[in-house]
Amino acid sequence: MQLKVTAGSSIIGCIDGLSGLEIPGDKSLSHRAALLAALASGNSVIRNFQVSGVTQVMLEALMQLGVAWSLEDKVLSVRGAGLNGLKKPEQPLYCGNSATTLRMLTGALAAGGVGAVIDGSDGLRRRPMGRIVNPLQAMGVPIRSTDAGTAPLILDERDPSCPLQGMEHKLSVASAQVKSCILIAALAADQPTTVIEPGPSRDHTERMLGSMGVELESQQRISDTGKTVYKTHITPLKHRDLRPLGDVTLPADISAAAFLIVAALLAPDSQITLKGVGINPTRTGLVDVLTRMGADLEVGNIHEIGGEPVGTLTIKSSGLAGTEVFGEQVVRMIDEFPVFAAAAAIAEGDTVVRDATELRHKESDRIALLCVEMQKLGVQIEEKADGFVIHGGHPIRGGIVESHGDHRLAMALAVTGLAAEEPVIVMDADVVAESFPGFSQLLQSLGANILVEQ
Ligand code: S3P
């Protein structure tokens, strides 16, 4: 499938969950809710669950592990198997392109002492897994990777009545996936565990585990080198019993909303309202940076659902000015750089992104490939080792681009088409369904000229 986007029309409307067209439920929260509900002792109901390619692989893996669940109309019901209740799978667990599934699931298998092979797509096999294998080994988990530190991972069975060792582990790169893997494994440790990160990675696992009866503490500290570090301290689970989630509703995914936000900024005379969007401060870097660049973007009706802040976002077409993004802000918008590049391309002046080497280890090398594809459209973008520079405010030509199997790259290139002189055609765009199956229909319903071609 390919997407053809032609600029010119305005993006107008309100996405409030009433029209049937919706921003999907949060991907990070959907993964966590499914997995942690499976580890709980009791039943959970999760509403507004994200039904997409990446959450499907998590659910299929849970089925292979003997977890009973049902999914109907975005409501996921899970019968918790308990921390030690996962069954040894008969086949390797296939995580597709989803590093979140692979890393968090590995933490859960480690806690339960389950023997398994955990694998994924060729793309996932290229992503670094030493960052979970090394700390898990230090905790006493019998796990190994390929010599290159990649999947497939092999976990040997372990007597779950023997606790793992609690420890202090320092991450060189802030990563919620790695932190979550360690925290979940640490539920089965005999001593507390502390994870130290150089940036504020998303804290959904901590919030959710806290609501399930786990004792956790998060602190921000100045280290000996004068840098701010983020510490998460978890106390092992008493009696190995995790309370179920009960009945929770997940907010709309701010990382999916990001494409609509930038679409409305780029398209002429546009205004959209997005209701019920998750605005956890560890995820709102894009909102902060766009506001600084001059975006007419308001956040209102802030309240909490299921322990997560949500709000209504109102966005109008805006002139933007270039900016610099570095340090902690990178961590707080780690998934948003492909679409941020579209906003930077229309901003007057230079936009510099640095401290973002981690983008090279996402679903694609999001520095190199973003530069290659944006250049094809006429965007003046320069690759740097740890980010990129965009000389903005110049005409965007349009043209034919590739998704490289990366859902966010595909959607970002499509959104760029809303500001291009000629149509933008995104090839191999089926991958959009990994995290945002209704992407083109939703944009179309708001007035965008976007065609799905087979
Ligand atoms: C995620 C964390 C991020 C993000 C990914 C989802 C999560 O990865 O890129 O899309 O749900 O924990 P890192 O934590 O490895 O940066």
Image (cartoon, grey):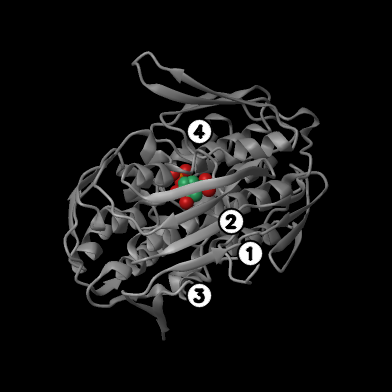
| Nearer to the camera, 348 or 103 | 348
Mark 2 lies on residue: 275
Q: Amino acid at mark 1?
A: Gly
Circle 4 or circle 3, nearest the eye = 3
- Would the CB of label 2 be found within 8 Å of ligand 1? no
Mark nearer the N terminus (2 vs 3): 2
Circle 1 or circle 4, nearest the eye = 1
Image quarter in which the C terminus is found: bottom left
Please state the horizontal and vertical placement of residue 102, each as a whole percent of the image.
53, 52
Mark nearer the N terminus (4 vs 3): 4
Q: Amino acid at mark 4?
A: Pro
Q: Amino acid at mark 3?
A: Ser
> Label for residue 196?
none
Please state the horizontal and vertical placement of residue 50, each as a whole percent of the image.
61, 61
Which residue ends up furthest to the bottom in the rendered image?
454
> Label for residue 445?
3
